[in-house]
Amino acid sequence: MSSSGEWPLWEVFVRSRRGLSHTHAGSIHAADATMALRNARDVYTRRGEGSSIWVVPASAITASSPDEKDPFFDPAADKVYRHPTFYDIPDEVRNL
Amino acid sequence: MTEVEVRTACALRLGDDGLVLSHRLAEWASRAPELEEDVALTNIALDLLGQARTLLTHAGGLEGRGRDENDLAYLREERDFVNCLLVEQENGDFGSTIARQLLWSTYQLGLLEALTRSTDSTLAAVAAKAVKEVAYHRDHALQWTLRLGDGTEESHRRMQAGLDRMWPFTAELFERDGVTAEAVALGIGPDPDGLRPGWDAAVDAVLTEATLRRPADTWAPTGGRRGLHTERFGHLLAEMQHLHRSHPGARW
């Protein structure tokens, strides 16, 4: 058998029930996509957590870098007008 | 045999099969090739243990001697166990374990599908629930058989060796005796002969795709259903029963 070092890493996304989004559950090792799905099923849906699973090769994910954190995310911090709660809703508006 | 005795024997056989195979698979805990496989094999073991608990409880109830699942699992002697020889075989390497899983789960799936129509309502209910579990067990074994058989030279060699080692013990699965004959007559269980064509076709299809050779039917050991077991079964029982026998009534 190959060791974990030779098996690629897969990120696992589980949807708990219809209507919700797939949520990142963790990662597993597997030799190919078919086995990755089964391994994900065995490791992350043992207690009835799932109704659908996605597996994605970890290498296919492009992640934002911690170094870029400030320019990426800080500018959004003081834009209060981007939140719906910033606006007063006139009493006459019923269905919003 | 009375009808109740036949129903008891059927429940006990399938219950013992599950209990013993569950214990063998649990031996992989912390020793599987990968963490993911560790969890997969022990998940399968827990499915089988769950089935066994219901079946042994049912057998104990039918028997009417006041024995519960624990009495049957932990306080019977080797000669009282009626599991088939295949499920008690030692794990060997991962290839051997996968070979045993493929041969057993293919058989068990066919058996359970037939048992969903059993006149014994508990057997039928257990079968209806277990069919889904065992379909996954079979898929797990199938996926690995394909990858090991059609993998590297070494994985192919070991998968074939595991298959050759487990193969002789499959003959017993289709054996007919007084219990199976009565079970057929009473509509409790299927005729083993009827399960054979489906098993042959399913196993052959996997072996062909996995570039493995179907072993020849030569030696056909038997005796499990009569309590005559292979040498290492006593060691398995010693480990499985030790805690309960040393500390009767021990609870978590």
Image (tube, grey):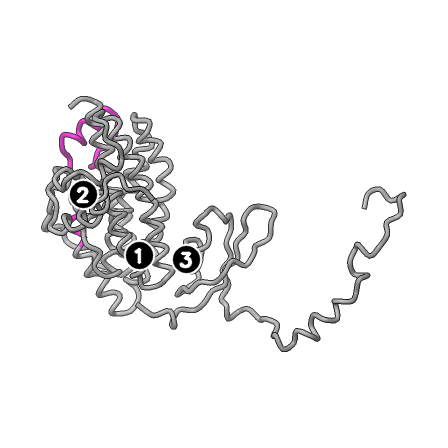
Q: Which mark is residue B29?
A: 1
- 3D distance between C-alphas at marks 1 and 3: 15 Å
- Which residue carries the number 3 mark? A39
Q: Position of residue B122 (x, y in %)?
A: 32, 29
Give me the chain letter of mark 3: A
Q: Is residue A31 magenta?
A: no
* Residue at screen point 86% across, 49% down: A89
Q: Earlier in the sequence, mark 1 or mark 2?
A: 1
User: Are discs 1 and 2 located on one and the same chain?
Assistant: yes
Q: Which mark is residue A70?
A: none
Q: Position of residue B80 (x, y in %)?
A: 14, 37
Mark 3 falls on what kind of element?
A: helix
Where is the C terminus of chain B found, in terms of image quarters? top left
Span shown in magenta: B166-193
Give me the chain letter of mark 2: B
Name the dominant secondary structure of the magenta segment.
helix
- Which residue carries the number 2 mark? B84
Q: Is residue B180 magenta?
A: yes
Query: Which of pointers 1 and 3 indicates the residue nearer the eye?
Result: 1
Mark 3, other Cα within 10 Å: few <14 / some 14–19 / many ≥20: many
- Three-letter code for the amino acid on which mark 1 is drawn: Ala
Residue B108 visible to the viewer: yes
- 3D distance between C-alphas at marks 2 and 3: 29 Å
Mark 2 falls on what kind of element?
A: loop
Mark 1 falls on what kind of element?
A: loop
Q: Position of residue B136 (x, y in %)?
A: 37, 48
* Residue at screen point 81% across, 46% down: A96
B19 sits left or right of B125 in the view: left
B47 sits left or right of B200 in the view: right
B71 sits left or right of A90 in the view: left
Mark 1, other Cα within 10 Å: few <14 / some 14–19 / many ≥20: some
